[in-house]
Amino acid sequence: MEKFVIKDEAWFRRILEELGTPLYRYLCSQLIDQRWAEDIYQDVFLALLKTKTEFVDDDHVRFWLFRVASNKVKQFFRKSSTLREVLVDVDASPIFRHLSASDEGCSGLDADHCVWEYVSDLPRAQRECIYLKYVEGYSANDIARITQSRASTVRTRLLRARIALRRAMEGGGYGF
């Protein structure tokens, strides 16, 4: 299989069109403010323009973009100015508005809450794993590579997130 580097504007536009929306949704699911998500989104695609990485195929580009985005989110939260989190306004957040727009996953729950509203209350690491697993369809091993964690850590985060979600949806609170 021949490796390739970004060759032209058409290739970049195609990648932007195909992967831009999933990447933006991922960033919105991880960040507190839409403006921060937009800034990091631009930084990720700027990094794609500047990289000398030789990509094997489009899946390699997708994986690379999500890994860079994950690293930039971690860097963002390490900055002292962003250590104070503000609660997500689920109605204002584009990712939760998008995911809550369908009734899928909302049946049988409190009418005022959808699954993604509960997910927004999870710790960031668990929220990241849930999003990558159930929205983007990555395996635990792929999530581990993206988040630079061990696969067992990812599986534990997924398990704890599912338990916390079950408790919250049953009305028992999160109990973190």
Image (tube, rainbow, N blue to C red):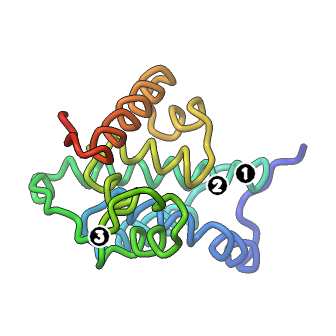
Q: Quadrant of the N terminus?
A: top right
Distance between the alpha carbons at the discs numbered 2 and 1? 5 Å
Horizontally, residue 105 falls left or right of residue 10, namely left
Q: Looking at the image, is mark 2 or mark 3 nearer the viewer? A: 3
Rendered view: 127 above or below 149: below
Residue drawn 29% across the image and 70% down it: 90
Residue 50 percent coordinates (x, y): 55, 63
Horizontally, residue 9 falls left or right of residue 21, namely right
Q: How many other residues sit within 10 Å of disc 1, few (<14), some (14-19) or many (≥20)?
A: few
Horizontally, residue 174 falls left or right of residue 6, namely left
Q: Which residue is mark 2?
A: 62
Q: Which residue is mark 3?
A: 90
Q: How many other residues sit within 10 Å of disc 3, few (<14), some (14-19) or many (≥20)?
A: some
Rendered view: 156 above or below 89: above
Q: Which residue is mark 1?
A: 59
Quadrant in the rendering for residue 133: top right
Q: Which of these two is toward me, 130 or 36?
A: 130
Q: Looking at the image, is mark 3 or mark 1 nearer the viewer? A: 3
Q: Are marks 2 and 3 in contact (CB under 8 Å)?
A: no
> For numbered disc 1, what is the local secondary structure?
helix
Check disc 2 and give the amino acid type: Arg
**Which residue sits furthest front?**
108
Rendered view: 108 above or below 94: above
Residue 132 percent coordinates (x, y): 52, 48
> For numbered disc 2, what is the local secondary structure?
helix
Check disc 1 and give the amino acid type: Asp
Q: Earlier in the sequence, mark 2 or mark 3?
A: 2
**Which residue sits furthest right?**
1
Check disc 3 and give the amino acid type: Val
**Which residue sits furthest top?**
152
Quadrant in the rendering for residue 17: bottom right
